[in-house]
Amino acid sequence: MTWSFLATALVVVLMPGTGVVYTLAVSLGQGLRAGLVAAFGCTLGILPHMGASILGLAALLHASAMAFQAVKLAGVAYLLWMAWQVWRGTGALAVEGRAERFPAWRLIRDGVALNLLNPKLSVFFLAFLPQFVPADAPDASLRMAGLALAFMALTFAAFALYGAFAAALRDRVLSRPGAMACLRGGFAASFAALGLRLALADR
């Protein structure tokens, strides 16, 4: 494993995206423990893309316009549904002091779904991982799996830090109704914007 891979992967995971927004919203609404569970769910959502990249299925997704569009549209619909949930102040993403506590499996399910329904992630792995594995390496698949697992570890660590930061500010934010309203609108707009960006994405 090279330092260039770790540095590049760290930059990628620190960039705000659906997983970051989801972890921040859950941490603010339900606290650090729930935020860590959400981060874990988002990290698990990387596994299918990792497997697709190693098995070559990501190349098929990249080549097939119909398959790519189908997954993309499902992802867009899910992101818009998440935006609606946040805007209404309901569900696991409710940013309220009296927010309902949701079981871990539901937080994990939503985190997995957010990443699973993002076809760009498979294409990213298809283009990203092979750069750090020699084409003639006899154990290329194992090396790619090792790099992908390292990427997942960095993802969870980064998301956990985001969650810890949000949870630390939770009491201060929840005691201000105006701040809660701004956050709710901001998170809803973020999910909607991410959905729009995915809708406009090309392969």
Image: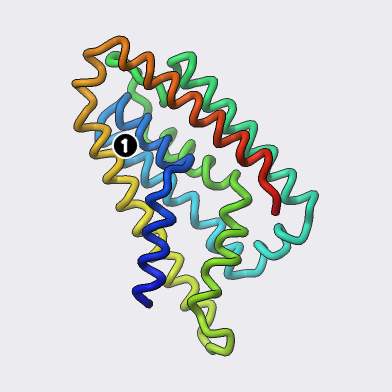
The residue indicated by pointer 1 is: 35
Above-or-below relation of 102 to 73: above
Amino acid identity at mark 1: Gly
Residue 62 placed where, x, y %? 71, 59
Name which residue lies at 29% across and 45% down.
Answer: 160
Name which residue lies at 35% across and 34% down.
Answer: 24
Residue 51 placed where, x, y %? 56, 63
For residue 9, which quarter of the picture? bottom left
Q: Quadrant of the C terminus?
A: bottom right
| The one of 85 and 7 positioned closer to us in this rendering | 7
| The one of 134 and 110 positioned closer to us in this rendering | 134
Name which residue lies at 48% across and 36% down.
Answer: 110
Name which residue lies at 27% across and 45% down.
Answer: 161
Of all residues, the one furthest to the top in this rendering is: 177
Judge left or right: residue 122 versus residue 85.
Answer: right
Q: Secondary structure at mark 1?
A: helix
Q: Quadrant of the N terminus?
A: bottom left
Total marks shown come to 1
Q: Residues within 10 Å of mark 1 (few under 14, many from 20)?
A: many
Above-or-below relation of 20 to 191: below
Judge left or right: residue 127 versus residue 4.
Answer: right
For residue 76, which quarter of the picture? top right
